[in-house]
Image (cartoon, helix red, strand yellow):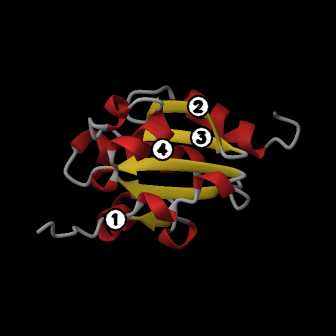
Amino acid sequence: MRTEFDIRPMVEKHSAIPIAHLRVLQSFDEVHLPDMRRGIIFVFAAWSGPAVLGLQRFTRVISSLDTRSIDLVVLDTDCLTEDSATQLFGAPSFATGGWGETIWIRDAHVIARVLAHTTPESLIEQHTRGLLDDNAA
């Protein structure tokens, strides 16, 4: 029997963005990827130091931007199956490390994927600004 660990308290503790502005999910079915127009999914592993550092870094970088038009999702990595990981990453192996994988979505399509704890902050900001640009395709 799998016991669910609630990631919400850890996300709240380590996020530079108020928890009220995030959708913290423990089921991939709640993401609703086909309906997502502009979104960022941060795959969080509560048991992983790099994921915690990645969440801190990612939320700090985007906290200065007006992200109200972006669906900001923090998804528990432990809920991902091989199929759901493939939908997000193109291959399940990208999601299995608990590294703070971050995915930018525009019109239900993945437009960028990074590991937040190692990616230059300027690139995280650039991908996020790209979602905010109405003229970006």
Q: Residue at x 63, y 58 (%)?
A: 71
Q: Secondary structure at mark 2?
A: strand
Quick one: label 4, few (<14), some, or many (20+) residues within 10 Å? many
Q: Secondary structure at mark 3?
A: strand
Q: Amino acid at mark 3?
A: Trp
Q: Sequence-wise, which precedes: disc 4 or disc 3? A: 4
Q: CA distance from mark 4 to mark 1?
A: 14 Å
Q: Are marks 2 and 3 in contact (CB under 8 Å)?
A: yes
> Which residue carries the number 4 mark?
58
Label drawn at residue 57: none
Q: Sequence-wise, which precedes: disc 2 or disc 1? A: 1
| The C terminus, quarter of image | top right
Q: CA distance from mark 1 to mark 3?
A: 23 Å
Q: Sequence-wise, which precedes: disc 2 or disc 3? A: 3
> Which residue carries the number 3 mark?
104
Label drawn at residue 112: 2
Q: Residue at x 70, y 50 (%)?
A: 38
Q: Residue furthest left?
A: 1
Q: CA distance from mark 4 to mark 2?
A: 14 Å
Q: CA distance from mark 2 to mark 1?
A: 26 Å
